[in-house]
Image: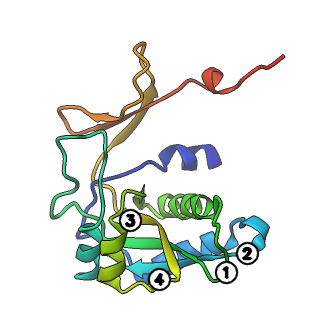
Amino acid sequence: MLKELVRNTRSYRRFVEAHTVSRETLRELVALARLSASGANRQPLKFLLAAEEPTNAEIFATLGWAGYLVDWDGPQPGERPAAYIIILGDTEISANFGVDHGIAAQSIMLGATERGLGGCILASIQRDALRAALKIPDRYEILLVLALGKPAEEVIIEPVGADGDIKYWRDEAGVHHVPKRALDELILDLP
């Protein structure tokens, strides 16, 4: 059911690093993005796939993890992503990528969840360092990095508390809590 697939597609930041993700699986996930909507059907997105060391380590070094968890530097060795998909915008096709990369990223994440994987969509990227490390030509704008693997953490959705705080947090057992606003708070009834 779609509702359960969406509910289970969370931002995971800790993985079973030893659980490999094949390049074929990454290709299948990008195939879902290929079928997704694209503004004016320009289809300007390109995808770099990584599922092996040392490329994974080079990508990992350029990423910022979980801004609200100020005392956490990101996944430790053994709990890092097993694979990455880097979403690029081809500036020779379009100068503006609109929301295409967001649509593509969500399609990929839904497909990952369906396959028993999890991931995190990252925009906190040291783009110049990533470009240099992977020798990405200037014509490609680095839009997002998707970290993928078998989740090694539990993520719980809960209502936003009375204080209105929407910051995610981890409890003493390492369970990741994500407050979500109530549906009635999101829907406006305008006159």
Q: Residue at x 62, y 59 (%)?
A: 103
Q: Earlier in the sequence, mark 2 or mark 1?
A: 2
Residue at mark 4: 138
Q: CA distance from mark 2 to mark 1?
A: 7 Å
The crowd level at tag 2 (other Cα within 10 Å; few <14, some 14-19, many 20+) is few
Tell me the mark number nearer the camera, choosing from 2 and 1.
1
Which residue is more in the foreground, 56 or 79?
56
Q: Residue at x 43, y 80 (%)?
A: 49
Residue contact between numbered discs 2 and 1, judged by CB atoms under 8 Å = yes
Residue at mark 1: 93
Q: Amino acid at mark 3?
A: Leu
Is disc 3 placed on a helix, strand or loop?
strand
Is disc 1 placed on a helix, strand or loop?
loop
Q: Residue 12: x percent and y percent?
A: 36, 52
Which residue is more in the foreground, 15 or 92?
92
Q: Amino acid at mark 2?
A: Arg
Residue at mark 3: 148
Please indicate whether residue 23 sits to the left or right of residue 30 in the image: left
Tell me the mark number nearer the camera, choosing from 1 and 3.
1
Rendering quarter of residue 124: bottom left
